[in-house]
Image: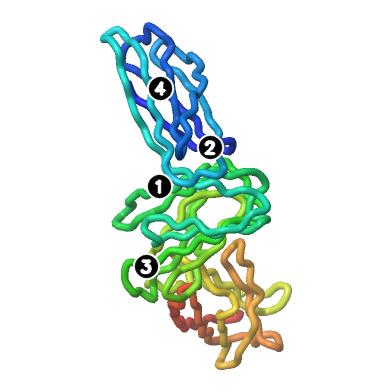
Amino acid sequence: MSVACTPDEDGIAVRVTAENAFTTLPSLTVEEGDATTAVVLRRVSAREYEGHFTPRGTVRGTRRLTAVAASGTGRAEARAAIDVEPVLPFTAGTVALEGGRILVAYDSLSVLKPLYLCVTTEMEEGHAAYRLAPRSAVLGSGLTVTLAPAAADARAGLFYRAGSGAWQFIGTPGARRTGHVRVRLGDVALLTDTTPPVMLGLRAVREPARAILFRFADDLAGVEYDSMKSYIDGHLVIPEIDGRRHRALAGAREHLARGPHQLALRLTDRMGNTRTTVRRFVIR
């Protein structure tokens, strides 16, 4: 027999399963601080029951669950534990986890309803990713997450990922990396980014004016648009940036004359990695 716990937007869902069919209704209790409470179970199948409980908002830390049942092989008992940190509306505080390496701060507007925060750690390609659950919970103003790097690394930034999406840079420089998790919970991790952005392509355009269209990309942190510098024939030009399509349109103050020209483009990502690319092009 086994007990599995899953955080959801209303508390903790519990599933009790056995290899053989239950011969009696299993019982399930949860210990929170000094209190022990029975959890009501509902039959799903002959070998599976499910239940749900709402953690006590005044108790932080580990909840211990014990299931007892009779099956075809006799009396069985199973235990499980889950760490829960209640975050309540109209309150403020900080939750310290992993010995203080990860901090989650909240204020009176951070959540719209009680949030029973559960944080687990998973290793991905050599780095630790912290999963903030339940992902189905909708936040108010959001949570502030701070991670401390294991070692000083100027290229380690704080990143956030919702579901199976791509990592998004949310961190700021400093001894600790701090960022804001908005709308929904997800994964946070310290990732190292040492690769500068690149210019992918360049072509001349004639409408609405003679100019050049170039594309750019960055593998992780994303391009810092305010730091983008472009020069045509040595003269600074301000490009029109289309961040959604990762492209920009640049033209001189006056229409570019027909013939050869040179573009110098400096791209910097949000981690400070910089690359300057020089390309020649022809206006026909």
Q: Nearer the viewer, residue 164 or 99?
A: 99
> What's the residue at 28%, 10% (across, down)?
74
Query: Where's residue 132, x and y in %?
Result: 48, 49
Which dot, 2 or 1, sits closer to the camera? 2
SS class, disc 3 = loop
The vertical placement of 153 against 89, above or below, is: below
Q: Residues within 10 Å of mark 4 (few under 14, many from 20)?
A: many
Which amino acid is tagged 2? Pro
Residue on which disc 4 sits: 16
> What's the residue at 67%, 47% (across, down)?
112
The circle drawn on residue 66 is none
For the residues labelled 2 and 1, say whether their Cβ atoms are less than 8 Å apart. no
Query: Where's residue 13, x and y in %?
Result: 50, 30
The vertical placement of 23 against 157, above or below, is: above
Query: Where's residue 258, x and y in %?
Result: 63, 85
SS class, disc 2 = loop
Residue on which disc 1 sits: 120
Counting residues from the start of the chain, the first of labels 1 and 3 encountered is: 1
Mark 1–mark 3 distance (CA, rounded to whole Å): 17 Å
Q: Residue furthest front?
A: 34
Q: Quadrant of residue 15?
A: top left
Residue on which disc 2 sits: 55
Q: Residues within 10 Å of mark 3 (few under 14, many from 20)?
A: many
Mark 4–mark 2 distance (CA, rounded to whole Å): 18 Å
Left or right, 109 with reference to 80: right
The circle drawn on residue 149 is 3
> What's the residue at 49%, 53% (across, down)?
161
Counting residues from the start of the chain, the first of labels 4 and 2 encountered is: 4
Query: Where's residue 29, x and y in %?
Result: 44, 26
